[in-house]
Image: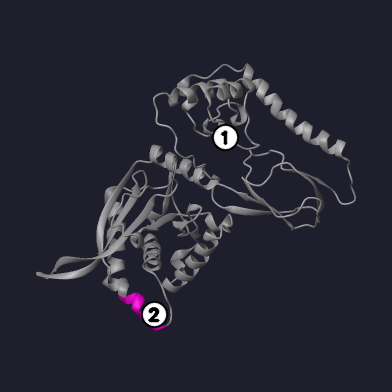
Amino acid sequence: MITSWLIDLGTSYDVDALLYEVETEKNTVEIVAKLPGTILRVIAPSDCELSVGALLAVVADPGEYPDDSEIDALVGADLAEIAKIEKLDEAAPDPSPMAAMDTTGLLPVGADRGMRVIPKARAMAAAAGLELSTVIGTGNGGSITVADVEVALASDLGGSAVAERRPLSSVARGMANVLSASWRDVPQFVQQIHADATHMKQIRAALAGQGVRVTFTDILIAAVAATAREVPEANAQFNPDAIHIMADVNVTVAVDTDAGLLVPVIARADQLDVAGVSVRLQQLSERARARRLTAADTAGGTITVSNLGAAGIETGVPLVVSPQATVVFAGAITDCAVVVDGVVGIRPLMGLAIGYDHRVLDGSTAARFTSALKRRLETGA
């Protein structure tokens, strides 16, 4: 999706000038110019979602001044390709209703210039009062066919009216695809424990005395990274022919933003102390909330940490996101009555739920990681 143009129409620009901002499945990226030129006509306006390879704008090389007829010819040639696709879709046999509902690998079509609709399908939708933006296109290039409209109309029969439609961003759509694939393809299991957070509180207090403020998430990430080095099977990925133990411990962290959940990566987290993790996480979180994460900021994660303790959530069932094999979910720290050496006392306990890919770790190996993480959080060793 083109979220905004960063250069005005008719403006000349040099190499490395910022041209436009595009939202991908993982982040928002500013696109820079590889060659100098001048923007002559913008084809894809802001908030326009297009398929890969679509025409975005017409630019001219320095010193070139084409007239409107030449620009129209270029744009017309691109639109002619779309017309060819529509003719192919009209000639193609209609898919079965079940096939039309299979959206694997297809992009939902939004109400924008990127929508491709067979004329007959458009007429059917208009006659039935069906909003085309709610229809999933299964034709070539994601175009909406007659069968797609028929399936959408059939699914609406007897259903409740839609009160509000909230279009999915590229990030949300990408996340949905990844999570659906993980739930479908990865055999998963979860181990749950409680860790005494007394030592974690002592770490925070000691660093605060030195003027360094860290969070429980910072401490958890550092502990997870160190434990992943101790039990390398937790820092692995499944491949059909082999289990790959990853060389670096790169911790993916779930960060809540106005744009939804984003997942920056702390590279080589096992080489950082708690203060170092804190600095890096703060940098990534600020960039995530400003929607300025780069591709490098979200790449290469080998193990995931998610902490919803601040929201008061005590436990959960985390979902392993393939190709990673381990996800650590942390809940709120609560004061609980526990028995220590035969005496009942009050201790701060953090709930942990750790999800594993059963293809990579069996229950015993996973238990080694779970127990080692609990030990490290409680003792620092």
Q: What secondary structure is the stretch in magenta mostly built from?
A: helix
What range is drawn magenta here? 202-210
| Label 1 CA crowd tier, 10 Å (few <14, some 14–19, many 20+) | many
Q: Position of residue 1 (x, y in %)?
A: 61, 45
Compared across the picture, whether 171 is left or right of 85 comes to left
Q: Residue at (49%, 26%) from the top-left corner?
A: 152
How many numbered discs sit on the rendered protein? 2
Q: Where is residue 309 in the image (x, y as percent from the top left)?
A: 33, 61
Q: Which structural element holds mark 1?
A: loop
Which residue carries the number 1 mark?
109
Which residue carries the number 2 mark?
208
Q: Which structural element holds mark 2?
A: helix
Q: Position of residue 173 (x, y in %)?
A: 51, 42
Label ID, residue 131? none
Amino acid type, mark 2: Ala
Q: Is 218 one of the magenta-colored residues?
A: no
- Which circle's residue, 2 or 1, is located before the other in the chain? 1
